[in-house]
Amino acid sequence: MFIIREIIKAIRLTLILWLLTAIIYPLIILAVGQFVFPYEANGSIKLNIQGEQFGSDLIGQQFTSERYFRSRPSAVEYSQGKEAQPTGISGASNLAPGNSALIKRISEEITQLKDEGIQPSADLVYASGSGLDPHISVKAAREQLERVARARDLRPDEVLPFINRYTEGKFLGIFGEPVVNVLKLNYALDVDEFDRQKQNR
């Protein structure tokens, strides 16, 4: 009889804990996220000028056109889905520093950057550990300034304020270095160009 009572007590406790941790707590977190931070809770999805989803502020994307600032290389190619939208699958190449495939990729990256008149820097040559990093250093962004300005038929001093606007400071003011969100920066340049074209019509 004692054992049966203890078993029933254990089952009740398990059900209560399951209810609290598997249903009530997640629902509270979901509600707080949706009502207090809806943009962040839904993936920080960015819409293009046509109102279509094209990426997340939190996940990098590949930009190959000269009109755009380049992101860091990605071992998972920013895990792009069928419509070239990031799927959020993280990963790194795990290649050793002496691996011939890694050396070849880095050499090609450096050559391409130099051909474009860009001084190679670590974040434009080496992939991030997650493969999803949407940021580059301020130095890497400024190295690309002339190329982007030329491709967009703008002066460098007209593009520089965009870099400054999308530069994020050190985490908590003390950790890391200031970085530039490439997706936000490129999107802002597109919006600015669209607005200028509209005014000239």
Image: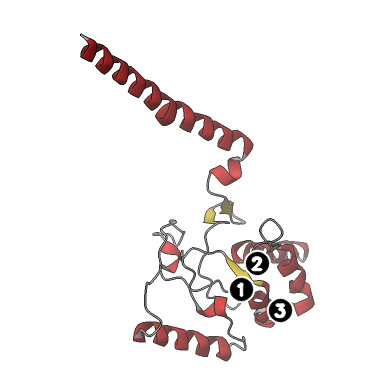
Say whether marks 2 and 3 touch (CB < 8 Å).
no
The secondary structure type at the circle numbered 1 is loop
The structure's colour scheme is secondary structure
Alpha-carbon distance for marks 3 and 1? 15 Å
Q: Is residue 175 above or below residue 13?
A: below
Viewer-proximal residue among 65 and 102: 102
* Residue 126 appearing in the image: yes
Q: Amino acid at mark 1?
A: Phe
* Residue 155 appearing in the image: no
Tell me: 102 left or right of 116: left
User: Where in the figure is residue 82, as x and y percent of width and height?
Assistant: 39, 59
Viewer-proximal residue among 29 and 109: 29
Q: Counting other residues with Cα less than 10 Å from the Cα at mark 1, is it few (<14), some (14-19), or many (20 or more)? A: many
Q: Counting other residues with Cα less than 10 Å from the Cα at mark 3, is it few (<14), some (14-19), or many (20 or more)? A: few
Q: Amino acid at mark 2?
A: Val
Mark 2 vs mark 3, foreground winner is 2
Q: Is residue 36 above or below residue 71?
A: above
Mark 1 vs mark 2, foreground winner is 2
Residue 153 — which label? Answer: 3
User: Where in the figure is residue 145, as x and y percent of width and height?
Assistant: 69, 78
Q: Counting other residues with Cα less than 10 Å from the Cα at mark 2, is it few (<14), some (14-19), or many (20 or more)? A: many
User: Where in the figure is residue 53, as x and y percent of width and height?
Assistant: 53, 53
Tell me: 144 left or right of 102: right
| Residue located beneath label 1 in the image | 69
| Residue located beneath label 2 in the image | 180
Please report the residue visible at 51 percent of the width from the left and 34 percent of the height from the top: 30
Ranked by sequence position, the earlier of labels 1 and 2 is: 1
Q: Amino acid at mark 3?
A: Asp
The secondary structure type at the circle numbered 2 is strand
